[in-house]
Amino acid sequence: MNPDVVKQFGGKLLNIYTGAVLTKLIEIGFQVGLFEGSRAGPATTDELADRLGLKERYVREWLGAMATSGIYSYDPASKRYSLPQEHAALLTGNSAQNLSPMSRMINHFGTHLPKLTACFRQGGGIPYSAYRPVFTQCMDDMWRRIFDQLLVSGFIGVVDGLTDRLRQGIRVLDIGCGTGHAMNVLAREYPKSTFLGYDIAEDAIARARAEAKEMGLTNATFEVVDVTDLPGDPTFQLITAFDAIHDQKAPDSVLRSAQRALAPGGTFLMIEFKFSSRIEENVANPFAPMYYGISLMHCMPVSLAVGGQGLGTVWGEQTARRMLGEAGFGNVSVLDTPRPQNCMFVATH
Ligand SMILES: C[S@@+](CC[C@H](N)C(=O)[O-])C[C@H]1O[C@@H](n2cnc3c(N)ncnc32)[C@H](O)[C@@H]1O
């Protein structure tokens, strides 16, 4: 045994546990507005607490962790803490760069640990319903920002000819649409096209409908539908699935169903996580441990809970290509997206 390696690994474990604790504290900062409140400039613990109507003692302890971890800087002369603007860029605001909503999702998954641990011995899974309504809110917090900033130009815009077809007017279906923001954004952008969103989650569909109404959209509708078996009629010129295939009970049936529901010349757009199906090719990928973990804590057990295939978030490009082929898609290409952890499968008949 090499004592230097033991020491090194001890350091790595310290970072891992520190990251776990800070993830919880980032969620607190996100929930009570500490990051947003810090944008107004450097503040003492009293000043920041006053700014936000919070209890100073709690804010002080939180800032202790923020300053010693390097998320905030601290000036001993003025006793003021500041959130550098480069850090604020990733923890505040409505842009897709704001990563603080991710902390809530990770922490929420952690609340299911006793059930997950039991699954290792007993099998089975954790049903989707156990994660709601927090999951619905977390997904919305993360993806709404992504859709607002990147959907039109970064996802739709890079698929050859798709923007023109949407401008002219086509029928679009989003499977596993969650709170529907993607369809609502596209419905506003392309008024000649019609947009339909399906999801099994009633809370998510209610929110999607409410938002469409708020936005005054007449070309976006949402239904509670299990997408495992879509009718082939009517057909759609564009079917999208944003992060919604790998956690299905029967992803193979969903893909076959999508293929049947696609009009001739139509496009199936599947946004997934950019991994290889071979673990050895993911070892150097910095996103891999997190997404294997997210898969284990949510995407895989929700599928296994209903006797599903439990494909997992890291099913990878090779498996996805094979399954798209088996579903009847003759032509599949894989495009990069503005988010390095995602890729986009563009499939046609
Ligand atoms: C990871 S979420 C993605 C939600 C949304 N596309 C987004 O990007 O925010 C996956 C969604 O698929 C839905 N879903 C899972 N199985 C489904 C099924 N069989 N039929 C319809 N929706 C399903 C879930 O309820 C959930 O909203």
Image (cartoon, rainbow, N blue to C red):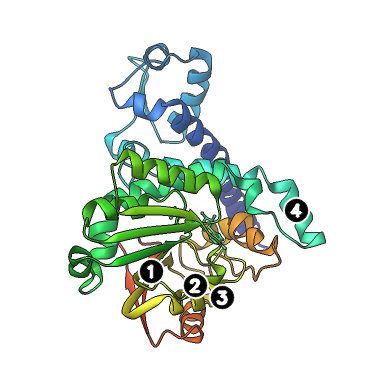
Residue at image point 64% right, 58% down: 302
Asked if disc 3 is less than 8 Å from ligand 1, the answer is no
Mark 4 or mark 3: which is in front?
Answer: 3
Q: Quadrant of the C terminus?
A: bottom left
Q: Can you tell which quarter of the image residue 164 is in? A: bottom left
Q: Is residue 340 left or right of residue 254?
A: left
Residue 82 visible in the displayed image: no
Residue 245 visible in the displayed image: yes
Which one is earlier in the sequence, the residue at label 2 or at label 3?
A: 2
What's the distance in space between the residues labelled 4 and 3, CA to CA? 29 Å
- Where is mark 4, residue-wise? 117
- Residue type at numbered disc 3: Ser
Q: Kindly check if marks 2 and 1 are in contact, taking CB atoms under 8 A apart as contact.
A: no
Q: Kindly check if marks 4 and 2 are in contact, taking CB atoms under 8 A apart as contact.
A: no
Which one is earlier in the sequence, the residue at label 2 or at label 1?
A: 2
Dot 4: element:
helix
- Residue type at numbered disc 2: Pro
What's the distance in space between the residues labelled 3 and 1, CA to CA? 15 Å
- Where is mark 3, residue-wise? 253
On screen, 70 above or below 169? above
Which one is earlier in the sequence, the residue at label 4 or at label 2?
A: 4
Asked if disc 2 is less than 8 Å from ligand 1, the answer is no
Q: Quadrant of the N terminus?
A: bottom right
Dot 3: element:
helix
- Residue type at numbered disc 1: Ile
What's the distance in space between the residues labelled 4 and 2, CA to CA? 38 Å
Residue at image point 50% right, 13% down: 55
Q: Which mark is residue 231?
A: 2
- Closest to the observer, 76 or 169: 169
